Structure formats: structure tokens, C-alpha cells
Image (cartoon, rainbow, N blue to C red):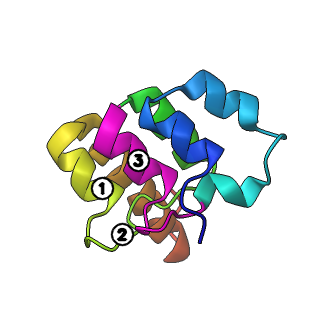
Amino acid sequence: RPEFSLVHAAAVNGHRHILEYLQGKVPEDVFCGTDAGGNNALHVVMKHACDFEAAMFLLDKGCDGFAFNEERMSPFSLAIENLPELAKELLSRKSRVENKWMGRDV
């Protein structure tokens, strides 16, 4: 596992514009990759920057908002504490996916 990627570095300060710049310049899987502590870039945004726009960008890139790191923390649990509007968005997206899986069009 890489220690830290360019995506993680941009996420530390919530730099959405740098994350956007990195699109097409780094492999797509780097946006969802984890560091040595099991943190994806969304964990990093929530631990350090608490930036809603950067977090939404990473969600749209496929970062797992419910993934646990080695400390057993998820971006969702961090959002509950630090950015409740992101926690609401994560729950909304999860609900839509599960309802579609169950055959309900929402």
C-alpha cells in the first residue's frame, strides 16, 4: 500500500481544484486508494479539512464513505462529528442504492 498519494495530499487541505486537476493525470483507482493506515482520500478530507465540496468530489469519484480504516473509523462516522451535511448525503446515497437493489425506483 502506498504511504500517501497526490490525491491524499490534496485531500488534507480540501483542495477540490487540485483534485479536479489530478483527474486524467493519475490512475482513477488512486482516487479511491488507501494509505498505510487504511484511509481513503475521503477519510483524509474528514480528518483534516472537513471540506464539503472536496468530499462530494471524492464521493462522485467512487470513494467509499462507509469504509473502515485501521482505527475502525469511517468517513461517515467522521462526518457525523465534523460535517453533518455530508453524513446526510452519505445516508441519502446509500438509501437510493439499496432501494434500487430491492427494485424500488427512488
Relative image position of residue 28 (x, y in whole percent): 75, 54
The first of marks 2 and 3 along the sequence is 3
Residue pointed to by mark 3: 44
Quadrant housing residue 55: top left
- The Cα–Cα distance between marks 1 and 2, rounded to whole angstroms, is 12 Å
- The Cα–Cα distance between marks 2 and 3, rounded to whole angstroms, is 11 Å
Q: Residues within 10 Å of mark 2 (few under 14, many from 20)?
A: some
Determine contact: label 1, label 2, CB under 8 Å: no
Q: Residues within 10 Å of mark 1 (few under 14, many from 20)?
A: many
**In this rendering, which labeled residue sits more in front, label 1 or label 2?**
2
Residue pointed to by mark 1: 76
Determine contact: label 1, label 3, CB under 8 Å: no
Residue pointed to by mark 2: 69
Residue 88 is one of the magenta-drawn residues: no
Mark 1 element type: helix
Relative image position of residue 86 (x, y in whole percent): 33, 40
Q: Amino acid at mark 2?
A: Asn
Please indicate whether residue 6 sits to the left or right of residue 72 in the image: right
Relative image position of residue 101 (x, y in whole percent): 53, 75
Residue 44 is one of the magenta-drawn residues: yes
Q: Amino acid at mark 3?
A: Val
Q: Against 38, is 79 above or below? A: above
Residue nearest the observer in this picture, 98 or 83: 83
Residue farthest front in this picture: 3
Residue drawn at x 69%, y 30% is 20
Look at the image and give the residue range highlighted in magenta. Answer: 33-50
**Quadrant that contains the N terminus:** bottom right
Q: Residues within 10 Å of mark 3 (few under 14, many from 20)?
A: many
- The Cα–Cα distance between marks 1 and 3, rounded to whole angstroms, is 12 Å
